[in-house]
Image (cartoon, helix red, strand yellow):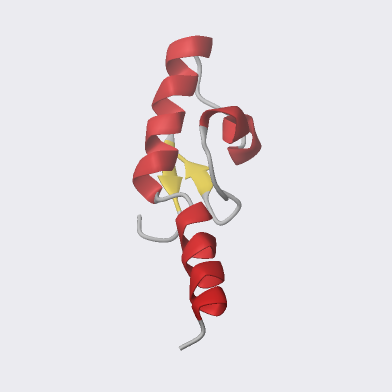
Amino acid sequence: MNPDRLEKRARAVADRASCRTVDAAITAYVAVHDEPPAAIADLAGYVKGDITAYRIVDGTATGPGC
């Protein structure tokens, strides 16, 4: 076992956002701006973690786990 390697891998997984997280960010964005976000980059201030694997299609998140 390599604890440093395991910790690094666990942190990488924890830093990724989920589909549910992105959908919640879309909802928050709409509540603030009264319109849906035009691009996933619009949600950067609403989400902690990496959301680059997601897209917005018809107002909802599309990507891993969706």
Vertical arrangement, residue 12 with respect to residue 38, above or below:
below
* Residue, far bottom: 1
| The N terminus, quarter of image | bottom left
Say which residue appears at 39% left-offset and 25% top-offset. Answer: 27
Q: Is residue 19 above or below residue 4?
A: above
Whether residue 30 is situated above or below residue 12 in the rendered picture: above
Residue 30, image x, y percentages: 46, 18
Q: Nearer the viewer, residue 9 or 45?
A: 9
User: Which of these two is toward me, 8 or 37?
Assistant: 8
Residue 13, given in percent of the width and then of the height, sits at 47, 63
Q: In which quarter of the image is the C terminus?
A: bottom left
Residue 25: quarter of image: top left
Query: Relative to residue 57, is residue 5 drawn left or right?
Result: right
Vertical placement of residue 34 versus 62, above or below: above
Comparing 36 with 20, the one in front is 20
- Residue 64 position, x and y percent, is 43, 61
Q: At 51% across and 61% down in the image, what residue appears?
A: 11
Task: Determine the residue positioned at 43% across, 44% down.
Answer: 61
